[in-house]
Image: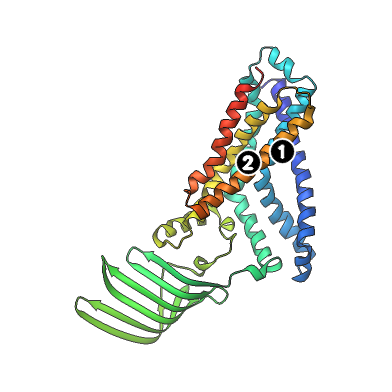
């Protein structure tokens, strides 16, 4: 790397960190003003509010969500300033191609890409778990669903279960039934008044049950009061919080996806969206960096303000497009992978067009 490369990388990363600091202060101020009534209502300790909820939970969450916006604004801000101070023209007119001029930007973008990817896979799920647990106690406990109604679940290739109502607080399910098949033939059906999770024995306890066994034309009935059984399902499989998947680590998320392929409980889209978002989202660092440099490397009459205004508008457009494609996947049947790719592909095309139009 030459002096220009080091200068651009230093400017890029320092502006990014400075912009992050500004956004964190603004976000915390607005979030506190919005949630202050909830903190007081549910008697949240101030030490937990600032150390647990904000420092370990909300700040990493918002930072991860707004990294594309912050990254784009940082690139446009310092590149526009360089162009306004006539620093870009001598670099390009001195024999450096625009592609070569992009190299230090892409090196800095790679640092942000790696940081975001590592955070998405190993750090953010942990901090989201802290944030979710706090919110479910001190912010919106009234919105927590404590029961799951009419749950159908396939727990292996031949076994299907149904629970009319599952209480997630006491880990008790009511009106439980389990059917076992051999190909298309029903071989056993168990019906019980309730099923309870025993966390000590790590087994399910079935109460007041009836088992109907079918062997060709021969049927037998068995009744009982208590029965322990091991099933490939856990109480957390019935959790229905909107933010539960964001608090899963990557290994747990992959395990849940593998189980969902068999069970088909209707959560696959949410799970895949969360998985693809963690791996594909960081690539926006390259796309928005390319777009930002191409957009702001030319000196314009409006100065830094015009480029910065256009950059902020495009950043929010990107975030809105991400939300729209996610909703189309959740509600409209759009494949999760396509939903995550659409914003990145569209902005990549726009970035390449701006690069083509950029000064050479």
Give the crowd class for mark 2: few <14, some 14-19, many >=20 residues within 10 Å: many
Tell me the SS state at disc 2. helix
Q: Is residue 171 left or right of residue 206?
A: right
The answer to which of 258 and 299 lies nearer the viewer is 299
The answer to which of 54 and 149 lies nearer the viewer is 149
Q: Is residue 197 left or right of residue 230?
A: right
- Quadrant for residue 89, please give it: top right
Q: Residue at point 41% right, 70% down? A: 231
Q: Residue at point 52% right, 46% down? A: 339
| Badge 2 vs badge 1, beta-carbon distance below 8 Å | no
Q: Which residue is mark 2?
A: 318
Which quadrant: the C terminus?
Answer: top right
Q: Residue at point 41% right, 79% down? A: 228
Give the crowd class for mark 1: few <14, some 14-19, many >=20 residues within 10 Å: some
Q: Position of residue 134 (x, y in %)?
A: 68, 64
Q: Give the answer, above or below, for where 167 lies relative to 46.
A: below
Instruction: Give the numbered dot on residue 118.
Output: none
- Report the residue that reaches farthest toward the left: 217
Viewer can see residue 82: yes
Q: Residue at point 56% right, 36% down? A: 346
Mark 2 vs 1, N-terminal side: 1
Q: Give the answer, above or below, for where 245 lies relative to 343.
A: below
Q: Position of residue 39 (x, y in %)?
A: 76, 66
- Quadrant for residue 307, please give it: top right
Which quadrant: the N terminus?
Answer: top right
The answer to which of 75 and 197 lies nearer the viewer is 75
Instruction: Give the numbered dot on residue 312.
Output: 1
Using the numbered discs, state the Cα–Cα distance from disc 2 to disc 1 in whole angstroms.
10 Å
Q: Position of residue 13 (x, y in %)?
A: 72, 34
Tell me the SS state at disc 1. helix
The answer to which of 212 and 306 lies nearer the viewer is 306
């Amino acid at each position: 790397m030459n002096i220009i490369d080091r200068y651009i990388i230093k400017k890029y990363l320092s502006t990014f960190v400075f912009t992050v600091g500004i956004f964190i202060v603004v976000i915390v101020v607005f979030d506190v003003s919005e949630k202050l009534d909830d903190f007081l209502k549910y008697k949240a300790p101030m030490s937990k509010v600032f150390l647990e909820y904000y420092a370990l939970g909300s700040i990493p969450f918002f930072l991860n969500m707004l990294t594309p916006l912050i990254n784009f604004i940082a690139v446009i801000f310092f590149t526009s300033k360089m162009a306004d101070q006539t620093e870009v023209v001598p670099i390009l007119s001195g024999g450096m191609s625009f592609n070569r001029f992009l190299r230090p930007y892409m090196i800095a973008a790679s640092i942000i890409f790696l940081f975001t990817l590592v955070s998405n896979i190993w750090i953010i799920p942990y901090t989201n778990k802290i944030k979710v647990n706090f919110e479910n106690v001190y912010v919106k406990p009234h919105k927590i669903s404590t029961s799951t109604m009419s749950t159908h679940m396939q727990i292996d290739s031949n076994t299907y279960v149904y629970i009319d109502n599952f209480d997630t607080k006491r880990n008790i399910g009511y009106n439980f039934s389990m059917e076992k098949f051999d190909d298309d033939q029903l071989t056993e059906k168990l019906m019980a008044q309730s099923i309870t999770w025993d966390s000590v024995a790590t087994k399910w306890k079935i109460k007041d049950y009836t088992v109907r066994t079918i062997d060709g034309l021969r049927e037998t009935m068995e009744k009982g009061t208590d029965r322990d059984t091991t099933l490939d399902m856990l109480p957390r499989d019935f959790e229905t919080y909107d933010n539960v998947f964001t608090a899963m680590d990557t290994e747990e998320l992959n395990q849940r996806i593998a189980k969902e392929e068999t069970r088909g409980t209707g959560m696959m889209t949410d799970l895949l969206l969360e998985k693809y978002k963690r791996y594909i989202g960081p690539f926006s660092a390259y796309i928005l960096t390319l777009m930002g440099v191409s957009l702001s490397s030319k000196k314009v009459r409006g100065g830094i303000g015009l480029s910065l205004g256009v950059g902020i508008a495009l950043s929010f457009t990107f975030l809105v497009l991400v939300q729209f494609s996610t909703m189309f996947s959740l509600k409209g049947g759009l494949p999760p992978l396509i939903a995550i790719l659409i914003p990145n592909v569209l902005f990549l095309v726009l970035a390449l067009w701006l690069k083509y139009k950029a000064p050479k």
